[in-house]
Image (cartoon, helix red, strand yellow):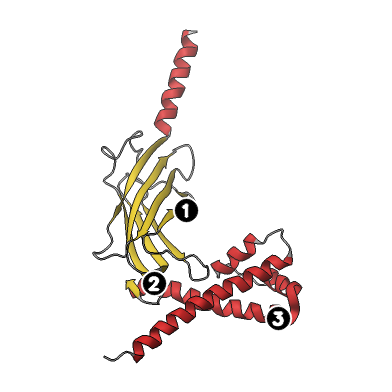
Amino acid sequence: MRNIAILITMQLISAAACLCQIKIPLVDISAAGSPVRISGTVLFQDDPATALRYTYLIDGSMTNVSNKEIVLTIIHIADTGVGALGLDYTVAVERFFGSNGLNPGGVEGINHSPTRLGPAVSAGSVPAETGPATGPSGTTAELIFLQFADGSTWGDPDAGRQQLSVRTKTLGELRRLEQILNEQGESGLKNELSRVGQFQFPAIDSLVQSCTNKTASCLTHGLRSTLKEAELHEAEMKAVSRSDLASPK
């Protein structure tokens, strides 16, 4: 019995040493005047028993502290303070193709699937579960680019250029698909979407995934709704731009 008790104790100690969790606060380091405020935590887990032993799970939120609706946010989240491979993650939220922007005073979650990383060459085990007071100083979150519903922007234009390019290409692809729908009907649209990979267009891929195992009319309604919302946003931005050009300097 004594040997069994010792074995059980050793197994419990081993398990405690091999799996630890640290909850790290998100620290907003966005530049002064940022239109959003970022807060939350990142859960870090170290499990040496697995090949991708380090797991990061973001649980944060952003609050629109401006007086305008927001259609695009790009936030960079980084952590290097836990003695493991650091988190280096950029999350872009594109609302241009939907009806729900981030309105003034609105709060929106920053959630994503767990990020798993392999061990760094020099990384050792991190401390056992601990609180923010004794853990790393924090994981940084920085708003690097934002676009309002009127088309005006905040942040680094270079950081937003790629996302805006994807938007333009997606809008062109939506119009091409609408033409196929008008000419070939629902079956033609479904065949085209199954034949041509849409992974380079996240908004279209999301539509396809949401209509899996549903009738062809799901794709039809989804396509037209997505295109309608995009064109409404596009028209609003152009109207504001024309108004600015017409205003006396």
Q: Answer whether labels 1 and 3 touch (C-beta < 8 Å).
A: no
- Against 140, residue 68 (above or below) is below
Quarter location, residue 175: bottom right
Residue drawn at 44 percent across, 14 percent down: 6
Residue 103 in sight in this render:
yes
Q: Position of residue 168 (x, y in %)?
A: 50, 78
Q: Amino acid at mark 2?
A: Phe
Q: Position of residue 23 (x, y in %)?
A: 36, 41
- Against 29, residue 82 (above or below) is above
Q: Residues within 10 Å of mark 3 (few under 14, many from 20)?
A: few
Q: Residues within 10 Å of mark 1 (few under 14, many from 20)?
A: few
The quarter in which the C terminus is drawn is bottom left
- Against 2, residue 53 (above or below) is below
Q: Please name the residue that numbered disc 2 is placed on.
A: 148
Element class at badge 3 = helix
Alpha-carbon distance for marks 1 and 3? 36 Å
Q: Please name the residue that numbered disc 3 is placed on.
A: 182
Looking at this view, name the residue that lies furthest to the left.
32
Query: Of marks 1 and 2, which one's residue comes earlier in the chain?
Result: 1
Residue drawn at 32 percent across, 46 percent down: 25
Alpha-carbon distance for marks 3 and 2? 32 Å
Quarter location, residue 67: bottom left
Residue 123 in sight in this render:
no
Q: Position of residue 166 (x, y in %)?
A: 49, 74
Q: Which mark is residue 112?
A: 1
Q: Amino acid at mark 3?
A: Asn
Alpha-carbon distance for marks 1 and 2? 23 Å
Q: Amino acid at mark 1?
A: His
Query: Of marks 3 and 2, which one's residue comes earlier in the chain?
Result: 2
- Identify which residue, 132 or 88, lies in the foreground: 132
